[in-house]
Each structure stands twice: as structure tokens, then as C-alpha cells.
């Protein structure tokens, strides 16, 4: 079986000459379908760089990265946007919903970019919102929703296109403890349904929800352990 | 993501920033209105001047004595006067079938009095055919006749300005007036042609040629022969027949011709060309304001792209391609421009209902269509730089933007 994520010796270098920064220094990592992985590390450890590369938002300087068997390093920008659309569902720390646009329209957006017809799109977006328990908030705009609700809309948006990978970047970083519990419960539920999740966090109790935790330090994997 | 949806999101973005969008549209609106209004004024001026040239006479060709090249080089040529016989010859239906009428004229500057009122004007002596040739109809009273002309009766038809100055409110028909000591009876008053371009066309008196020659100017050369072509299509043929008749009578050819022809049709063409350039210049000046409006669009779209950098990053992260982002911003700027153009059109229609300085503006359909096409072009052209900038943003940097 092809792993969802397959990183071999991935290196990312910023700058040149004396100012060179090795944000990632030979990271190798395999994530299989249904895995729930937490990536931890102090700030400056390379977490965000790794997340950008895994999310096909950025290209590694060296090394191999296959997502669902696709060699990401060889793709141009338009091909990358297609990969992001089909393969990855993003959940960001700051929710990143489109402002002045209803929850429903936000959730529909990935399907719209994929070219799904309006009627089908609407039905699928409604179903996704129902799955995160927001069927009564569909026509609210982001500024009319609480932080926890916004993050649940973002989860619905990440799920609606049935991606191979859910990529969550500090999903609870901006939430109070109750909303944090809600969102983590939602992610657990997704995991139980067999989805592959990669979550970046710096909080131990959040990372406890994952099956496997890797800790980054200075751009290298410092620790790779199974939870429970 | 089809066009309709991109369109919808464009309109949404415009509505989200009403004041800013409104001010940007104002620029386009003023530009479009300026183009349409100024071109309409140019056209209105053109219509008015064309109208007053046509008021001089229908299908008029005027013959003047004298050589075309001026006096010095042609000193050895004998210049024959234009005579009444020349005019008679031009009325020959066999030699000049496309000339419907020809009438000799002789002008006299006269000072006329009636009762206590006086007025200086020009008296034209001619034949009754002159009324038709010069497009002069009477509104009251009647014309003088061939027998008035043969007998040299002291009768006259006067223009509106002359009537007002000599007779004030009173009815001038049948009244007497004295011009340079010669008493005339007023037979009729001409329909007003208005005053524009060529001075006051109502400041004139028309009297029998014989009378004018006998009492005022003496028997000298004629001033002109006024010739009317049978129709506007026949102008060229009429002019050809005219020259062949006169060349034969004066015993001249093209190089030695001792008379000049002034063709109203060619004047109209020349004047229309000049007015066309004038109108195009007006349109171009107005076009500059449209250009400024377009720069306003670029400006506001750049602000919009900067402001929405993060949104663009989000859209790219969830799979929007360069093309989709480009399209979204292009449509936004084009819709902005089109709505502005629409209001500009409404404004132009309102403004052109007003008559300014005697000119009734005439909206040129092509300028309306042109303004619309240009404003779509402006939306696309001036929106393309900001849209391109948005489309080429790198998603990680855009997402990091606060």
C-alpha cells in the first residue's frame, strides 16, 4: 500500500552565504492511511516549514516528498494548487475563513475550485456543516461566529472535498478550553472514521490525542514515539 | 469556478466596500459622461452649422467673376463680367439639363428708413427664381414677380431682422420704406433662418434686379450668378454643364477661366471634415478623463489586493489556481468599470437634454457604444496589473500576511 506521506531526507534551506538557515535538515517520515500524527517542537524547530512542505505550500530544497504517490517536488504552481485542492484539507490556527462570506459559501469553496456543480456542492457543504454540528449556523458570516464555531466551519471546509490528508496547524491555538475540547473531539471522530490526520502543536495534552508523536529539534526529528 | 460565480464574487467584493467602490466608479462615470457629452456637443455644433449652410440654399452653386489665381499673374487676361445673358444661358434646358434654375444677383449696401426708424443692411437684386435657389420663403405677404422685374418696380421682400428694425411690431406688408432715397413697397417678410455661423441670415432685403441696378448700383458687372442643381446627386453634372456653358460664352478654358465656382456641396464636405476633427478632439480630451478614471481603478484594485492578501492566501491554500484568482480580480475591476459607465451614460443623457449657447447636443450612438466598450477595456487593462499581482502571490507569504 502506498503511504499517504512519504518524506525522504527532506531539507529546506533559506537564504545563502553566511545567512544560510537550515530550517529542515534531513527529515524522513512515513505516514500511512488512517494514521493520526502529532508534530511537536519548540518555536524555530522547523514545525511550520515542515507543515508548509507537507501541505504543498512550499517546495523542499532537497530530498523526496511523495503525497499519495505523487512526487510533489516536480510540480509547478498550478499543479500544486490542484494537489492542495484534491489531497489536502487545511485547518489553521487562525481559522482563515474568507471574511464577509457565509459559513456555507466558505465550505463550498474547495468544491467550487474543483468544478463541482452548484447543487451538489451545496448539498455536500450542508452535510459537512451538519457533521460538525453547525447546521443551524450555515448562513452566518465568520464575524458572527465564535472562535470554536469558526474552527468547526474550517474543519467542515477541510473535510468537504474528501482529502487524503487533514493537515491541522495548531488547530486549538486560538481557542478556549471548551472549544478546544470540541475541536479535538471532532478530530478524534474523524480519526475513528479512518481519516489520516497530521497535526502540528506545541501542547502536550493536545498531542495526546494522536497515535504517534514526533518531536522536531533544529530541523531534525529528535523523537518519534507511539502514544498509548 | 465558472464565469457566473466569479462575477457574483466580484459584485460581492464591490458591495463590501461601498464608499470606495462608489468613488472609483465616479471616476469612470465622469469620464464616460464627458466623452458622450462632448461628442454630443460636437455633433450638435456640426448639425447647427450644416443646417445654416443648407439655409443658404438647396444644392446651391455660386458663380463669381474673377480669376482663381488672384490678380498679379493673370494681369494679361481680360476678365469678362458676368452678365444677365450668362444667367439666361444657364437656364437653357438643352445645354444645362441638370441645372434647375439660375439667377443673377447684384448687392447693394443700403440704409433704409420707415417712419422714424432706420436700419443699415444689404439689398440683393435678383430674379424671382432666387427665392427658391436661396431657400428663401415668405412667411407673410408674397414674392415679387417676373413682371415686377421686367418693369423695374420698386417692391421688396424683407428679412425678419429688417422687419423688426423698420416696422417694430406693426405689419410691414404694403408699407413703404426708403432705401438710399429710393422708396420701396414691402411685399412680404421672409421665414426666419436664424443667426449662426454666417451672421444674421434674416438681415436682408430681396428686390428685383432691374430695380436695384436702375436706382442703386448702376449697370455694372453682376456680383454672382446663383445656380441650383436639379438634385444633390446632380451637383457634379450641374457644375460640369455650368462650366461648359460659361467657358463657351466667355471663350476661355480651364487655365484662363475668368470666373470662379463655389459649390455648396464641397463646402459642406469641407466643413463636415473640419467639424469631424473638432468632435474627435473633444472626444479625445474627454478620453483623458476616462484614462484618469482607469488609473483610479488600478489604484483601488491594488489597495484591494494588498488588503485581501491573506484572503488570497487562503483561497490558494484550498486550491484556487492562478487563473481563478486572476479572473476574480479582473471581473471585479471590469464590473466596477461597467457600473461606472452605466451611470455615466445616465448622466450624459440628462446633461445632453440641456441646450447650451444655442447648440442642441446630439448623442452619437457610436460614442455610447464606444464608451461602453472602452470601459470594459479599461476594467481589463487597468485591472490586469493588480490582478496579476494577486495571482502571483506565494501562498505561504500571503497566509502569513496580517
Image (cartoon, grey):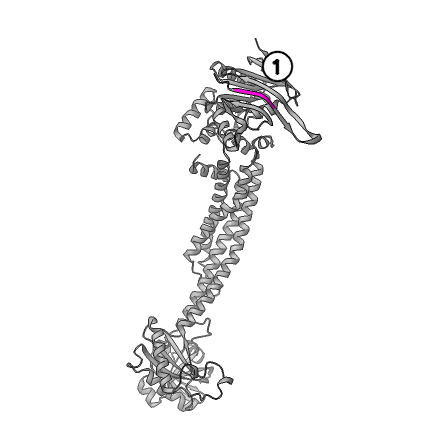
Residue B331: x and y, percent?
Answer: 48, 41
Give the main secondary structure of the magenta stretch.
strand
Left or right of B181 on screen, residue A215:
right
Q: Inspect this view and state whether residue A93 appears.
A: no
Callout count:
1
Residue B89 occupies which quadrant of the picture? bottom left
Depth order, front residue of A210/B56: A210
B182 shown above or below A76: below
Stretch in magenta: A5-10
Q: Is residue A192 left or right of residue B132?
A: right
Residue A6 is a magenta residue: yes
Of B167 and B210, nearer the camera is: B210
The foreground one among A4 and B377 is: A4
Residue B315 horizontal side relative to residue B90, left or right: right
Q: Which residue is mark 1?
A: A204
Q: Residue at x 47, y 57 (%)?
A: B37
Which quadrant is home to the C terminus of chain A? Answer: top right
Output the chain of dot 1.
Answer: A
On the image, the x and y values in percent for residue A163 come to 48, 23
B241 relative to B152, above or below: above
Amino acid at each position: 500500500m502506498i503511504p499517504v506521506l512519504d518524506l525522504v531526507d527532506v531539507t529546506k534551506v533559506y537564504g545563502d552565504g553566511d545567512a544560510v538557515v537550515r530550517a529542515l535538515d534531513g527529515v524522513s517520515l512515513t505516514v500511512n492511511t488512517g494514521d493520526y500524527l502529532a508534530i511537536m517542537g519548540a518555536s524555530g524547530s522547523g514545525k511550520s516549514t515542515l507543515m508548509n512542505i507537507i501541505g504543498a505550500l512550499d517546495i523542499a530544497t532537497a530530498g523526496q516528498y511523495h503525497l499519495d504517490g505523487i512526487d510533489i517536488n516536480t510540480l509547478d504552481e498550478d499543479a500544486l494548487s490542484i494537489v492542495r485542492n484534491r489531497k489536502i484539507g487545511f485547518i489553521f490556527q487562525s481559522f482563515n475563513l474568507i471574511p464577509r462570506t457565509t459559513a456555507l459559501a466558505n465550505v463550498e469553496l474547495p468544491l467550487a475550485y474543483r468544478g463541482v456543480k452548484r447543487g451538489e456542492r451545496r448539498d455536500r457543504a450542508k452535510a459537512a456543516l451538519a457533521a460538525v454540528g453547525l447546521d443551524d449556523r450555515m448562513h452566518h458570516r465568520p464575524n458572527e461566529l465564535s472562535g470554536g464555531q469558526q474552527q468547526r466551519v474550517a474543519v467542515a471546509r477541510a473535510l468537504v472535498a474528501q482529502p487524503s490528508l487533514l493537515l491541522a496547524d495548531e488547530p486549538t491555538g486560538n481557542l478556549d478550553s471548551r472549544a478546544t475540547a470540541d475541536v479535538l473531539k471532532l478530530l478524534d471522530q474523524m480519526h475513528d472514521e479512518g481519516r489520516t490526520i497530521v497535526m502540528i502543536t506545541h501542547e502536550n495534552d493536545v498531542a495526546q490525542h494522536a497515535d504517534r508523536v514526533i518531536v522536531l529539534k533544529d530541523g531534525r526529528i529528535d523523537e518519534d514515539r507511539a502514544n498509548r | 469556478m465558472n464565469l457566473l460565480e466569479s462575477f457574483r464574487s466580484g459584485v460581492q467584493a464591490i458591495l463590501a466596500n461601498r464608499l470606495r467602490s462608489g468613488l472609483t466608479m465616479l471616476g469612470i462615470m465622469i469620464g464616460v459622461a464627458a466623452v458622450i457629452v462632448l461628442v454630443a456637443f460636437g455633433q450638435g455644433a456640426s448639425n447647427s452649422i450644416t443646417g445654416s449652410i443648407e439655409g443658404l440654399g438647396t444644392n446651391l452653386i455660386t458663380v463669381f467673376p474673377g480669376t482663381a489665381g488672384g490678380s498679379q499673374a493673370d494681369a494679361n487676361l481680360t476678365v469678362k463680367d458676368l452678365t444677365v445673358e450668362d444667367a439666361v444661358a444657364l437656364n437653357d434646358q438643352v445645354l444645362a439639363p441638370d441645372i434647375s434654375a439660375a439667377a443673377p444677383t447684384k448687392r447693394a449696401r443700403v440704409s433704409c428708413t420707415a417712419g422714424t426708424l432706420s436700419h443699415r443692411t444689404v439689398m440683393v437684386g435678383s430674379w424671382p427664381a432666387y427665392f427658391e435657389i436661396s431657400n428663401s420663403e415668405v412667411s407673410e405677404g408674397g414674392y415679387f414677380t417676373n413682371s415686377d422685374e421686367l418693369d423695374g418696380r420698386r417692391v421688396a421682400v424683407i428679412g425678419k431682422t429688417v422687419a423688426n428694425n423698420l416696422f417694430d411690431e406693426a405689419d410691414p406688408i404694403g408699407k413703404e420704406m426708403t432705401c438710399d432715397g429710393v422708396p420701396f413697397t414691402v411685399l412680404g417678410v421672409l421665414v426666419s433662418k436664424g443667426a449662426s455661423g454666417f451672421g444674421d441670415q434674416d438681415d436682408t432685403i430681396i428686390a428685383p434686379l432691374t430695380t436695384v441696378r436702375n436706382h442703386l448700383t448702376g449697370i455694372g458687372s453682376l456680383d454672382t450668378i446663383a445656380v441650383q442643381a436639379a438634385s444633390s446627386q446632380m451637383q457634379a453634372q450641374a457644375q460640369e454643364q455650368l462650366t461648359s456653358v460659361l467657358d463657351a460664352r466667355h471663350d476661355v478654358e480651364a487655365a484662363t477661366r475668368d470666373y470662379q465656382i463655389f459649390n455648396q456641396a464641397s463646402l459642406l464636405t469641407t466643413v463636415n471634415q473640419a467639424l469631424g476633427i473638432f468632435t474627435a478632439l473633444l472626444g479625445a480630451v474627454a478620453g483623458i478623463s476616462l484614462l484618469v478614471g482607469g488609473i483610479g481603478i488600478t489604484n483601488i484594485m491594488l489597495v484591494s489586493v494588498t488588503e485581501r492578501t491573506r484572503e488570497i492566501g487562503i483561497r490558494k491554500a484550498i486550491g484556487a489556481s492562478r487563473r481563478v484568482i486572476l479572473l476574480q480580480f479582473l471581473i471585479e475591476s471590469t464590473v466596477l468599470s461597467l457600473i461606472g459607465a452605466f451611470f455615466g451614460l445616465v448622466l450624459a443623457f440628462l446633461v445632453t437634454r440641456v441646450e447650451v449657447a444655442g447648440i442642441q447636443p446630439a448623442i452619437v450612438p457610436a460614442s455610447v457604444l464606444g464608451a461602453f466598450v472602452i470601459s470594459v477595456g479599461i476594467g481589463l487593462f487597468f485591472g490586469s496589473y493588480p490582478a496579476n499581482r494577486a495571482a502571483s502571490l506565494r501562498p505561504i507569504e500571503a497566509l502569513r500576511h496580517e
